[in-house]
Amino acid sequence: MANGDTGDVACDHYRRYAEDVALMRELGLNAYRFSVSWSRVLPEGAGRVNQKGLDFYRRLTDALRQNGIQPLITLYHWDLPAALDDRGGWVNRDVAGWFAEYAQVMFRALDDRDPMWATLNEPWVVTDGGYLHGPLAPGHRSWFETPLASHNLLRAHGAAVAAYRAIGKNTIGIVVNLEPKVAASESAEDREATKRADAYMNRQYLDPIFLGSYPKELPPLFGEAWPALPQRDFDDIKQPIDFLGVNYYKRGITRNDPKKMIERAESVKNPRAIYTETGWEVFAPGLTDTLLWVRERYGKLPLYITENGAAFYDPPVADGGVDDPLRVSYLRQHILAAREAMRRGVDLRGYFVWSLLDNFEWALGYAKRFGIIHVDFETQKRTMKASAHFYREVVRSRGAVLEKG
């Protein structure tokens, strides 16, 4: 992790959740998306339940409800219990059952608070970063493990949805990260590379859920590493869901590159674009394109933008605030892009900024700040950035302020 950072304290939401919920209320938020730590609830991954862990989530959801804020609870955001990783993690077929057991514990504990549920967050990142290229946990680099992990993530999703249908009374979906892939040139090679990249990132997790099969491009890309998959798995994966969460940050300008793993394609930069601190192009029309593409390919299901935001350089806190004009501009452009998708018929039900607070960004540690609220990680003091004040006005004015910029 960057700078030897750890997540031991992070933004200390565990102890400061009441203060953070008060900030949400001050911003006028009517929904808050958070993720549950699997190992906080089931320290061994299965079996024994840690009631203190569950109690925290009860306190948090109660505080949200008392302040008129809808909880959207994500069950898995990349933190697999180490005890389960020791047993093979996402490569072990038993993981679907482990995940369903964990999900049922959460459903029974919190479903009476009327939350929305998401099974997984960005399964593509789990496998591409954790099993193929290795910068994320568990840090493997295996061509053969990657499709197995992807498939078992989808099986786990399906198992959790099936479990919810038996005992739940609200709504459940999944969250995926999507980016429109556009060819870097008109060459046949770049166009084919774009199709491969789209299949690997965008269609790999949605086609099985909505269409019951993987994109036809995937087996040739993985070659001998592509596993034999029983049809009953797809019957389990293709559970009807109530909504889809879309995380959007950038588009992928794609060029053919035979040396690249799996999709044999690479993303190239646009020399005329603004880029964030994480090297991602600022391209708001891609959000409109992505939402329209989902509707056209998978039908008119309810959509939520579950993550959208940017890491930019933030100056030090001065005069009680932080001036972050690039983030303000980013949010304005992308919320307008979301509005355009709605104008064109997308059933978009909500929008969540990533993120409320500056926080622990996995392998990036604390080196990149996405929050609209600044966190001093030494003192834990929260300070609203200009983007928070802007977002509060977006909420208060129901979007009218967007036209002023």
Image (cartoon, rainbow, N blue to C red):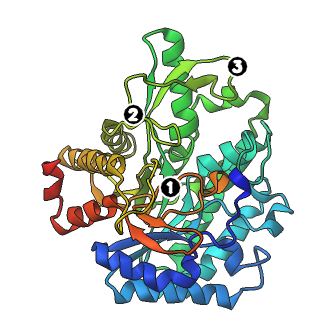
Q: Dot 3 corresponds to which residue?
A: 259
Left or right relative to 87: residue 202: left
Mark 1 / mark 2, whichever is N-terminal: 2
What count of labels does the image hold?
3
Asked if the residues shown at circle 2 and circle 3 are in contact, with their CB atoms under 8 angstroms apart, the answer is no
Residue 115 showing in the rendered view:
yes
Mark 2 / mark 3, whichever is N-terminal: 3
**What is the C-alpha distance between the residues marked 1 and 3?**
33 Å
Amino acid at circle 2: Ile
Residue 230 showing in the rendered view:
no
**Residue 373 appears at what percent x and percent y?**
41, 66
Left or right relative to 83: residue 186: left
Mark 1 / mark 3, whichever is N-terminal: 3
Q: Residue at x 56, y 26 (%)?
A: 196
Q: Dot 1 corresponds to which residue?
A: 369
Can you tell which mark lies on residue 274? 2
Q: Residues within 10 Å of mark 2 (few under 14, many from 20)?
A: few
Amino acid at circle 1: Arg
Secondary structure found at label 2: loop
- The image quadrant that residue 281 belongs to is top left
Q: Residue at x 30, y 47 (%)?
A: 334
Secondary structure found at label 1: loop
189 or 92, nearer to the observer: 189
**What is the C-alpha distance between the residues marked 2 and 3?**
28 Å
256 or 357, nearer to the observer: 357
Identity of the residue furthest to the right in this view: 86
Left or right relative to 234: residue 184: left
Identity of the residue furthest to the front in this view: 319
Asked if the residues shown at circle 1 and circle 3 are in contact, with their CB atoms under 8 angstroms apart, the answer is no
**What is the C-alpha distance between the residues marked 1 and 2?**
17 Å
Q: Nearer the viewer, mark 2 or mark 3?
A: 2
Secondary structure found at label 3: loop
